[in-house]
């Protein structure tokens, strides 16, 4: 107890009836019934209904106060009548009869209401984030975030992980996204970089002889905003382990996530064991390495159909003869869907930048299977039967087809798969469906330069017998790289690291790096690996995305306390901002204005 409160606004129940109490909080809502004024008093813990009689000398003053004024009230707890009980409130069986009150925090006119979850523009919400955070939904999201992080810490400690803090001011990374640079006053002309991730440091921790490390790590990347990615900064559960293989990392994450998602959500888990899907299989079946497994639709390759004489769909046949591919999505039992359903999908695909999606439905007519729809007439009965066999389909199903370069077709059908599933209400929204994407290729061909480059993480360990790797076929090499995906959202990438300097030089040489380039760009890491490094690996799931899933939010700003807008601006604190000439001189910097 102190002078501001004997209890909080979420704890008073019938057992406190007739007790004298002191409460402090914000005026959430007022209801004036003439002789009685009801005030919902809110603090972090909840809401308590307070009431004052017109005969009370404080009535008129309290009646005039604006919502969100901070007040302290003295009063007595009284039990509500049965018909006035509010079952939605923890304190719904009582109210506090106000005897006196005082103002402890005045308010100006509000730019947005707090008691409502009404949507407001991003600019208003972010500029007044301190008010936005008072609103119930987002307030609860931030509480959830705190509880999730606390739970993760406890579970990691149970698994014998130690938490270490890695540097924030470090060196610029030659790989990855753009760095945020920090000028050094003591070393004029030189810059620190904020860490994109603690990648090198956590590997150095393993080389230092520590066995299991974790950190709720702040990361900084100068990237554009997306719904599932904050511009500027984010947090991740950074993990690294020594003397492990890929499955050891999977075991730790699965153990943690099963407990985490069961504790903080009512949704069920699709499987206690997360499926392992090869990268090549994911691209082939889903068109992406971030598949939403709640969606039952599968992509099929039907390119071979267009070499048949009895297929007269010449537009696709000409493209296939030039090396293009045709892939398709089958929708089950959609023969009774109106023409508008199919046309809407086709028009949507055109708006996405493709040539549209050709479609028809398999029906039975005169004891023969034929195609009903704009292009169905170009496929013979035998061709339709072959497609049904290739795609594991039946009469009454429909087909959407795309033709073009492999990557372009995969991209549009990956999006179409989600669009069609949403339109048909096929996605099970009450589950979390996790999977591991594994066996990433070590290298790929750069589309612009046509040269070989690393496809994912250049510091990963290649698969197979290290002593007998065939370096002459780099595009066939697979790496111990993996992603964990949930409901179509990538939560993290990870890898078993390459801890052998000689092997690292060979792998970088394939991608066009000379030994001196590697020594120059990664000197600290190469040097450390040269002094006896253990096999090690790790992963770093994004905290923001985990909480976003648990809170059932589609935008990461809803689970971030003080987010920036899409232009990487903090509208509340007015950052980034200009600095004084004196500050620039001290750092020996000057600003060149664009002409």
Image (tube, helix red, strand yellow):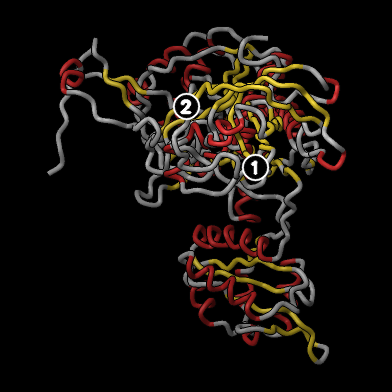
Disc 1: which residue: 32
Among all residues in the image, which is located at the extreme front? 55
Residues 151 and 326: in front is 151
Among all residues in the image, which is located at the extreme bottom? 366
Q: Residues within 10 Å of mark 2 (few under 14, many from 20)?
A: some
Disc 2: which residue: 219
Image spot of residue 298 (x, y percent): 69, 59
- Name the side, left or right, on which 421 lies relative to 165: right
Identify which residue is drawn at 73% across, 14% down.
158
> Is any part of residue 299 visible from this angle?
yes
Q: Are dots 1 and 2 in contact, CB under 8 Å?
A: no
> Is any part of residue 470 visible from this angle?
no
The quarter of the picture where residue 364 lies is bottom right
Identify which residue is drawn at 77% across, 66% down.
392
In what quadrant of the picture does the C terminus appear?
top left
Image spot of residue 130 (x, y percent): 49, 31
Q: Is residue 452 above or below residue 421?
A: above
């Amino acid at each position: 107890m102190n002078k501001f409160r004997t209890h909080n606004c979420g704890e008073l129940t019938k057992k406190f009836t007739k007790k004298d109490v002191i409460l402090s909080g914000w005026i959430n809502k007022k209801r004036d019934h003439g002789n009685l004024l009801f005030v919902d008093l809110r603090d972090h813990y909840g809401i308590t209904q307070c009431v004052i009689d017109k005969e009370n000398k404080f009535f008129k003053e309290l009646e005039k106060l604006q919502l969100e004024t901070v007040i302290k009230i003295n009063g007595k707890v009284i039990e509500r009548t049965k018909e006035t009980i509010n079952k939605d409130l923890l304190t719904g069986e009582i109210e506090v009869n106000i005897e006196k009150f005082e103002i402890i925090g005045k308010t100006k006119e509000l730019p947005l209401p707090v008691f409502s979850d009404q949507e407001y523009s991003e600019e208003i919400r972010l500029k007044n984030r301190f008010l936005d955070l008072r609103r119930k939904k987002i307030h609860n999201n931030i509480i959830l975030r705190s509880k999730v992080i606390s739970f993760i810490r406890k579970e990691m400690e149970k698994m014998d992980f130690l938490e270490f803090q890695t540097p924030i001011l470090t060196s610029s990374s030659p790989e990855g996204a753009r760095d945020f640079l920090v000028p050094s006053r003591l070393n004029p002309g030189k810059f620190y970089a904020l860490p994109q991730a603690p990648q090198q440091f956590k590997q150095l921790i393993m080389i230092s002889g520590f066995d299991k490390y974790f950190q709720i790590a702040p990361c900084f990347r100068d990237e554009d905003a997306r719904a599932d990615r904050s511009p500027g900064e984010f947090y991740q559960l950074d993990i690294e382990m020594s003397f492990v293989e890929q499955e050891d990392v999977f075991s730790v994450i699965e153990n943690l996530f099963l407990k985490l998602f069961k504790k903080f959500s009512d949704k069920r888990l699709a499987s206690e064991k997360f499926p392992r899907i090869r990268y090549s299989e994911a691209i082939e079946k889903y068109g992406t390495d971030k598949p939403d497994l709640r969606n039952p639709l599968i992509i099929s390759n039907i390119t071979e159909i267009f070499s048949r004489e009895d297929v007269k769909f010449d537009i696709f046949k000409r493209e296939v003869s030039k090396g293009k591919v045709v892939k398709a999505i089958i929708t089950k039992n959609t023969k009774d869907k109106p023409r508008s359903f199919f046309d809407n999908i086709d028009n949507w695909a055109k708006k996405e930048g493709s040539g549209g999606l050709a479609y028809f439905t398999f029906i039975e007519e005169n004891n023969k299977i034929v195609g009903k729809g704009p292009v169905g007439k170009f496929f013979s009965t035998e061709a339709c039967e072959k497609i049904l066999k290739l795609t594991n389909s039946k009469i009454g199903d429909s087909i959407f087809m795309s033709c073009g370069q492999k990557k372009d077709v995969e991209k549009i059908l990956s999006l179409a798969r989600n669009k069609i599933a949403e339109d048909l209400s096929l996605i099970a929204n009450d589950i979390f469906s996790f999977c591991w994407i594994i066996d990433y290729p070590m290298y790929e061909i750069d589309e612009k330069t046509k040269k070989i480059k690393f496809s994912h993480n250049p510091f990963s360990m290649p698969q197979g017998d290290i002593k007998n790797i065939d370096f002459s076929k780099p595009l066939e090499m697979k790496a111990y790289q993996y992603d964990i995906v949930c409901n179509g959202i990538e939560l993290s990438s990870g890898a078993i690291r390459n801890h052998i300097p000689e092997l690292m030089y060979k792998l970088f040489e394939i991608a066009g790096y000379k030994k001196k380039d590697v020594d120059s760009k990664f000197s600290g890491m190469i040097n450390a690996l040269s002094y006896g490094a253990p096999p090690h690996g790790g992963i770093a799931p994004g905290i923001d995305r985990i909480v976003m899933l648990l809170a059932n939010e589609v935008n990461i700003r809803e689970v971030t306390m003080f987010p920036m807008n899409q232009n990487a601006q903090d509208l509340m604190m007015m950052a980034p901002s200009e600095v004084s000439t004196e500050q620039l001189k001290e750092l020996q910097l000057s600003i060149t204005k664009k002409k």
